[in-house]
Image: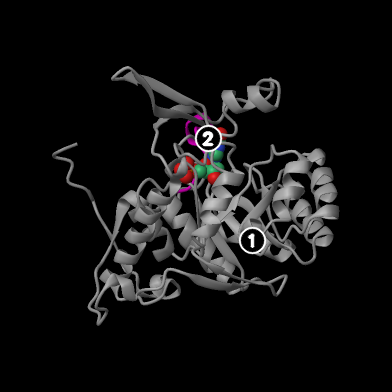
Amino acid sequence: MRIESDPKLDFKDVLIRPKRSTLASRSNVDINRQFNFVHTGRTWSGFPLIAANMDVTGTIPMAKTLARMGAMVALHKYYSPEQLVAFFNSEESKNTFYTIGTNEADWEKLALVKKQAPVKMICLDVANGYTEKFVEMVSRAREQNKDAVIMAGNVVTGDMTEALILAGADIVKVGIGPGSVCTTRKMTGVGYPQLSAVIECADAAHGLKGQVCADGGCTVAGDIAKAYGGGADFVMLGGMLAGHDECEGELRYEERDGEQVPTSMVFYGMSSDTAMNKYAGGVAKYRASEGKTVEVPYRGAAEATMQEIMGGVRSMMTYIGATSLKEVSKRTTFVMVGAQLNNVFG
Ligand code: 5GP
């Protein structure tokens, strides 16, 4: 047994130190980035934020709204081939990842959809990206989709980030256990503080001209700012985008003044009992559920939440004097803190 004793950090453990700058206003900063992907030579530009491929948030309506705002969506896996073909043939799909897992049926469906529609970005998603089989899957996905951007994960360490990029991933998805509806850490004791995972994996990926996506654990716009500060090229959000009109979640209503109004939405982890009962006919005996089911407040259109997030990122950039999002990590100094918020009013 070994113990690593250098500090490993979560978003809550740090703040970003302000820096002198000549920036006049937050309207002078550019929150878009342009990437060249290492295996495809393809480029992409926009605001590098991705709605998670969870069935509540990774929806076609979410993809339409976020594409309009320059951001991205990883679609959930449960659309029919017909729905996927129609969507991927539309202009609105330009910022959308097609998601596959380990299941052969997912690969067959992708092959079918690809015959009838262009699929330019693929998210290869498993809970544990540390198996030899997963590395082989990334190679296979690269072999079969030579010109598609491939995002693969999840992992939390530099060695495995490198292995996935060398196997064919352009973007490595980082995060084990930080998610809002994830219970992996509780059930297994396995995980890695998310900010340190992002810092270490970004360093490894950038050395190979790859990118990373910080996946999970962002609870407020400031956490997204910290993820970019730590070197994340992309940030993926589940919980922060749940509860919106674009979601496919069950709404809960309350009666107010004689009218039924939506007040909350059901949201759950993709390996929760709820998801497994819905898609896999129940929780298999050999595995425990590693996700929970919660209700999040109903929040209307996703556009307002996105504006708030984008406003937070812009403001962070003016505090540290970064004119473009690309400069953010170079201009970031984190300070470790014991407490970061004043909670006197809750
Ligand atoms: P959030 O933004 O809600 O904190 O995190 C979203 C991420 O949580 C997803 O992109 C995915 O990586 C992870 N996730 C989603 N469902 C589950 C689950 O049931 N179990 C675990 N361990 N992680 C999950």
Residue tagged 1? 94
Picture coordinates of residue 65, whole percent (x, y): 52, 52
Instruction: Decide if residue 306 is on the left or right side of residue 148.
Output: left
Identity, as a three-letter code, of the amino acid under mark 1: Lys
Contact, CB < 8 Å: mark 1 with mark 2?
no
Q: Residues within 10 Å of mark 1 (few under 14, many from 20)?
A: many
Residue at the far front: name it. 258
Picture coordinates of residue 218, whole percent (x, y): 41, 48
| Distance (Cα) linking label 1 and label 2 | 33 Å
Picture coordinates of residue 35, whole percent (x, y): 58, 72
Say which quarter of the image contains residue 16. Answer: bottom left
Tell which of 132 and 254 is nearer to you: 254
Confirm whether residue 6 shows in the render: no
Q: Give the mark, 1 or 2, whose residue is nearer the N terminus.
A: 1
Tell which of 91 and 297 is nearer to you: 91
Identity, as a three-letter code, of the amino acid under mark 2: Thr
Tell which of 139 and 72 is nearer to you: 72
The magenta stretch spans which residues? 182-193
Say which quarter of the image contains residue 7. Answer: bottom left
Question: Mark 2: is the Cβ under 8 angstroms from ligand 1?
Answer: yes
Residue 184 is tagged as 2
